[in-house]
Amino acid sequence: GLTRTLAQLSTRRQTAKLTLYRRFSSILLASICISGLWVSWQMGVIVSGSLDSRWTSLWMFDAFWHVLYFGILLAICYLWSPSKSNLQYAYMDELGQEEEEEEETEPAERNL
């Protein structure tokens, strides 16, 4: 869905929203990479058998996911926080549709 949204925003030339969604997709990609590294480290600890000696730090296995989700939530809050360009995001879709309608009606008017 995110890829489709990025393609749609690109074809409609909505650069402000496109930048916002590209940043969001970068954050999601980074969180996926970090998750993969964390799972690899967890599996390494479990397979190596050092789990019994690290029983005091087992809370980190569960806490990491909560910290990661909280970090993603903070990133979303930052990206979509109220700013000067909120009106630009709100009306950009309407402007893009009006331009498309004008482009569609111009060739029809020329034929008359």
Image (cartoon, rainbow, N blue to C red):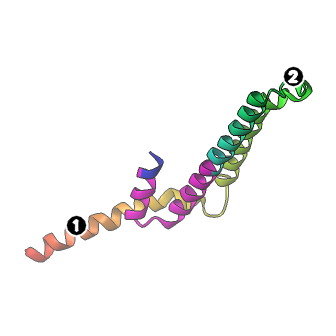
Describe residue 106's horizontal placement relative to residue 31 as left or right: left
> Does dot 1 land on a helix, a strand or a loop?
helix
Rendered residue at 54%/55% (across/down): 21
Q: Which residue is mark 1?
A: 104
Which residue is rendered at x = 45% and y = 56% of the image?
Answer: 6
- Taking the view exactly as shown, the residue that stands out farthest to the bottom is 110
Of residues 55 and 18, the one drawn nearer to the viewer in this rendering:
55
Question: Which region shows up in magenta?
Answer: 4-29
Image position of 106 with respect to 25: above or below: below
Residue type, label 2: Asp
Disc number lying in front (2 or 1): 2
10 Å neighbourhood of mark 1: few (<14), some, or many (≥20)? few
- The image shows residue 96, relative to residue 21, as above or below, that is below
Q: Quadrant of the C terminus?
A: bottom left
Q: What label sits on residue 76 in the rendered view?
A: none
Q: In this rendered view, identify the residue nearer to me: 15 or 64.
A: 64
Q: Residue 16 placed where, x, y %?
A: 53, 64
Q: Which sits in the foreground, 108 or 36?
A: 36
Please name the residue shown 78% across and 31% down the image.
Answer: 48
Q: Please say if 86 is above or below 63.
A: below
Q: Residue at x 55, y 63 (%)?
A: 19
* Label whose residue precedes the other's in the sequence (2 or 1): 2
User: Is residue 60 depicted above or below 90 in this figure?
Assistant: above
Residue 90 image position (x, y, % from top left): 51, 56
Magenta stretch: includes residue 25: yes
Residue 36 locus on image (x, y percent):
65, 42
Q: Secondary structure at mark 2?
A: loop
Residue 96 location (% of width, % of height):
39, 63
Distance, label 2 to label 1, CA atoms, is 69 Å
The residue that mark 2 highlights is 52
Mark 1: amino acid: Glu
